[in-house]
Image (tube, rainbow, N blue to C red):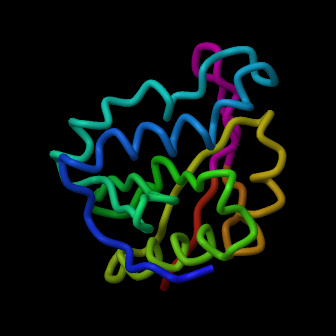
Amino acid sequence: MEEHEIRPAVAADVPAVKAVTDAAYHHYIERIGVVPVPMEADHAANVAAGKVFVTGDPVIGLVVLEEHGDHLLLDSIAVHPDAHGGGVGRRLLGFVDARARGLPEVRLYTNAMMWENQKIYPKFGYEIVGRRVTGPYDRIHYRKRLD
């Protein structure tokens, strides 16, 4: 698969950001019993705020990041199912680490029913720091120390 740069999303990318997010998360609806939060995000607002970074032409992957004083939150990562196995997720996670330079850690959480993620994140240096239920969402929280 051809590698593409990872760049800040622009307004013209909003439909693709929604489409890739929906494609990546849709299969979880039946499993977890609710629509995953990333599918309900205000993609236009996130893009306008500079939180979304995309790769591919057309877009095949993205991350949504929130910078905090003591960490970088990986709010969402999505790779279109047609691009699975091509290293897109690995490149996006590497981008997240680079983007977090100067901060002590990256944080993320995933639904406890998204068990695939629980196998992936530890391979990239993330450790479980807790589990919390917020409304209908049972989430496992991770961090990756960068110091």
Work out which quarter of the rendered image holds the N terminus and state it: bottom right
Q: Is residue 87 above or below residue 55?
A: below
State left or right for residue 45 relative to residue 20: left
State left or right for residue 43 relative to residue 136: left
Residue placed at 47% from the left, 70% from the top?
105
Q: Position of residue 121 (x, y in %)?
A: 71, 63
Which segment did they paint magenta? 130-141
Residue placed at 66% from the left, 16% from the top?
34
Q: Is residue 125 above or below residue 84?
A: below
Q: In which quarter of the view is residue 126 placed?
A: bottom right
Q: Position of residue 124 (x, y in %)?
A: 69, 75
Q: Is residue 119 above or below residue 136?
A: below
State left or right for residue 54 relative to residue 81: left
Prevailing secondary structure of the magenta residues: strand
Residue placed at 50% from the left, 30% from the top?
39
Residue placed most toward the observer, 96 or 130:
96
Residue placed most toward the observer, 67 or 41:
41
Residue placed most toward the observer, 138 or 19:
19
Q: How many marks are shown on the rendered structure? A: 0
Q: Is residue 142 above or below residue 97?
A: above
Residue placed at 81% from the left, 24% from the top?
31
Q: Position of residue 145 (x, y in %)?
A: 55, 75
Q: In which quarter of the view is residue 10 placed?
A: bottom left
Q: Position of residue 129 (x, y in %)?
A: 67, 53
